[in-house]
Image (spheres, helix red, strand yellow):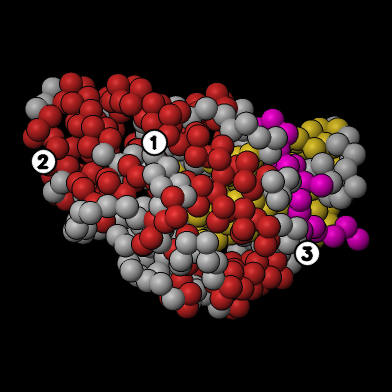
Amino acid sequence: MMRPEGVGMRLHTEGSVLRDEHGRQRVLHGINLVHKGRPGARDAEEFMGPWSTADVADLSARGFTVVRLGMIWAAVEPEPGVYSEDYLAWLASQLDLLGEHGIGVVLDAHQDLYSQSFCDGAPGWATLTNERFEATDLWSDAYLTSPAVHGALDAFWANAPGPEGIGLQDSFAAMWAHVAERFRGHPALIGYDILNDPTPGTASKEVFGALMHAFGAATGQDHNQIAAEFMEPDTKLSQLERLDDVAVHRAIGNTVAPLLAAFEKQAVAPMMARVAAAVRAVDPDSLLVREHSYFANLGIPSGQPPLNDHSWVYSPHGYDLTVDTPAIAASSNIRAGTIFARHAETQARLGAPVLVGAWGAFGDAVGVAHHATFLLDTFDTLGWSWTYWSWAEDFAGSEAAVALRRPRPIAFAGDAISWCVDGDRFTAVWQGRGCSVPSEFWFPDAAATEVAVECNGVGTPVSRTADRVLVEAAAGRFSLTATWR
């Protein structure tokens, strides 16, 4: 009997696809497990996530094969050069737990507003600012308005000297090297997401101003009025509706793109290279995951250069600007479509595989299924892997969880050509190779699913487990059609 391959996959890149050690094309689907700790948290226990073994078993039963596991710098290195064994031991326990349930792990150096002093991320000793932080109603607006956040980010991007004269980025890279040396070779480890949402400091004000000017020029409005309305929930939505005109959305992005390209080339790329070199010194094989700038989440084209590495993945994020607001169910497929079309253009330029690191953020909202389905269809069409944002204690009962529970490929013994879900029908086409293990597909109930597979037009048998359909590897053109009631 053919058997599915679980965790322990050693992934590498081949052009714009991921391959496992058997030569199969892998497609990863999963979720974020991130516990940020409260602002100002220092004790390791405050950063340890609340999910249980039963929760992880539930994620595995949903066909998830990857978790983007949040790792907070402030928790790893609470004092300069002093690494928390308690927190690292907890991370090790999570790798063990997820691996036991067939789920691979991407470690994510998570940050929001840069620092644990403001939200989550860098330790206090690596937060160089004399300004007082004041929270904003929508947490992310502090990226635009907070002098404390701006100053701390400016210091990080300048690699300003921290304690004992060591540059902040040098300390960050050394932290990553310590983590990579600790976990390299773990069977559940897939790779390292170098930094969540790289964001400019003081330059964020310039980027936002440029956005408002471009918005005004594209829509015939006063940019000051637009900026004021974007800071108010009710008027923000009416302004967002103007971005349902794809030409307007793209024109704004084209205008602002040079500002972001300068930031990504002059600030982010050198930092990524510094961390990559530190990690590769101790782990030459695991994937490196590289994101674009925070503002590219909105549909501004990313200007990042390729990472000079043999096995790296592009990890875009994207949300409609209804995210983190009560209007999340009103998210626009048109606006989100433009955002991810921009990311597809960036992938084509970079020639790297894609793992969408964060999307959705639907929480327990009702009325989000249409938007979730649109995004899932988009990712399938583009052939992308993804991790949904994010798990919460009420995730299993949410409308979002229901939408995510749909058929998907796990591995193609060859090269994927296409796959899609259309109502109660799933289809996949691939060019087979003579791999040593089968192609795999996940279904919520494989036993109750009618499956037909052809290779070069001739029917071929399949094998089933409770939730997987396996197709023997061979050369030729394969097509799979599955239906269910």
Question: Judging from the image, what secondary structure is the residue with disc 2 in?
Answer: helix
Residue lying farthest to the front in this orientation: 164
Disc ID at residue 199: none
- Residue at 46%, 66% in the rendered image: 79
Does residue 3 belong to the magenta stretch? yes
* Nearest to N terminus: mark 3 or mark 2: 2
The percent position of residue 173, horizontal first and vertical second, equals: 55, 49
Structural distance between the alpha carbons of marks 2 and 1: 22 Å
The residue positioned 50% from the left and 52% from the top of the image is: 171
Q: Is residue 179 among the parts visible in the rendering?
A: yes
Dot 3 surroundings within 10 Å: few (below 14), some, or many (20 or more)? Answer: some
Question: What's under tag 1, amino acid-wise?
Answer: Ala
Density class for disc 2 (Cα within 10 Å; few <14, some 14-19, many ≥20) is few
Q: Is residue 193 left or right of residue 215?
A: right
Q: Where is residue 402 in the image (x, y as percent from the top left)?
A: 49, 62
Residue 228: mark in rendering: 2
**Image quadrant assignment for residue 199:** top left
Which quadrant would the C terminus be assigned to in this image?
Answer: bottom right
Q: Would residue 56 be visible to someone looking at this image? A: no
Question: Who's the residue at 11% across and 26% down the image?
Answer: 221
Answer above or below: position of 187 versus 19.
below
Q: Is mark 3 on a helix, strand or loop?
A: loop
Identify which amino acid the numbered label 2 is placed on.
Answer: Ala
| Residue occupied by mark 3 | 465
Q: How many marks?
A: 3
Residue position for label 1: 296
Mark 1 or mark 3, whichever is nearer to me = 1
Sequence order check, earlier mark of 1 and 3: 1
Q: Over which residues does the magenta segment extend?
A: 1-21
